[in-house]
């Protein structure tokens, strides 16, 4: 679209109102990315002193790397800033139940993103706490989930 002046490349400002849910979601993700210590760390993940990454599947520590796999999960943990994320990617055409990593006492998982939910529940700001006893998360078909660990308060 570079240097082509035609209706196909013009920005449709009316679309901002029509697609305000997508704009809200995208702004929320950008804000999260720009303010998260995990994504601002100059050290590459898994390098000494950098953010730790742990690969999972529907079961913890059991990622499936074969061609038939439709699901992947991973944890990002920055021990310096006490930031801990769990990301779930369900590419399967049915919902899948993913095991959740344990959290420290007094802390819980909070749902930040679940793309299987309708707007405005697809991105929660502030993130919504999951029940403390919850050990699995049901990820909707072909969806992504981002959980953030934080204090129970």
Image (cartoon, rainbow, N blue to C red):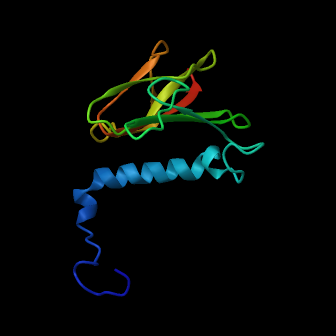
When asked about the image quadrant of residue 151, the answer is top right
Kindly identify the residue that appears in the image at 49 percent across and 15 percent down. Answer: 132
Q: Residue at x 49, y 23 (%)?
A: 100
* Residue 76 can be seen, yes or no: yes
Exactly how many numbered labels are in the figure? 0
In the rendering, at what x and y percent does residue 2 appear? 38, 83
Which residue lies at the image location 40% right of the left edge and 41% below the top edge? 67
The residue lying toward the viewer, choosing from 9 and 92, is: 92
User: In the rendered view, does 142 fall on the left or right side of 86?
Assistant: left
**For residue 54, which quarter of the picture?**
top right
Q: Using the image as rendered, state which of residue 93 and residue 137 is in the foreground.
A: 93
Q: Quadrant of the N terminus?
A: bottom left
- Report whether residue 113 is seen: no
Question: Which of 16 and 54 lies nearest the eye of the viewer?
Answer: 54
Left or right: 115, with 72 as reference point:
left
Instruction: Return the x and y of residue 37 as percentages of the image width and height.
Output: 65, 45
Percent position of residue 19, x then y: 26, 56
Q: Residue furthest front?
A: 67
- Identify the residue at the far right of this view: 48
Compared to 56, does 37 lie above or below?
below
Which residue appears at 44% of the width and 26% of the height? Answer: 58
Placement of the C terminus among the 4 image quadrants:
top right
Where does the image place residue 40, in percent across and percent down from the top left? 64, 51
């Amino acid at each position: 679209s570079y240097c082509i002046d035609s209706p196909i490349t013009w920005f449709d400002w009316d679309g901002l109102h029509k697609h305000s849910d997508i704009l809200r979601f995208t702004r929320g993700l950008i804000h999260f990315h720009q303010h998260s210590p995990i994504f601002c760390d100059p050290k590459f993940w898994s390098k000494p002193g950098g953010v730790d990454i742990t690969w999972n599947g529907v079961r913890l520590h059991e990622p499936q790397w074969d061609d038939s796999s439709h699901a992947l999960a991973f944890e990002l943990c920055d021990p310096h800033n006490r930031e801990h994320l769990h990301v779930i990617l369900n590419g399967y055409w049915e919902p899948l139940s993913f095991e959740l990593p344990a959290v420290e006492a007094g802390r819980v998982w909070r749902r930040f993103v679940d793309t299987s939910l309708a707007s405005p529940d697809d991105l929660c700001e502030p993130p919504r706490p999951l029940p403390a006893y919850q050990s699995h998360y049901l990820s909707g078909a072909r969806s992504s989930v981002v959980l953030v660990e934080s204090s129970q308060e």
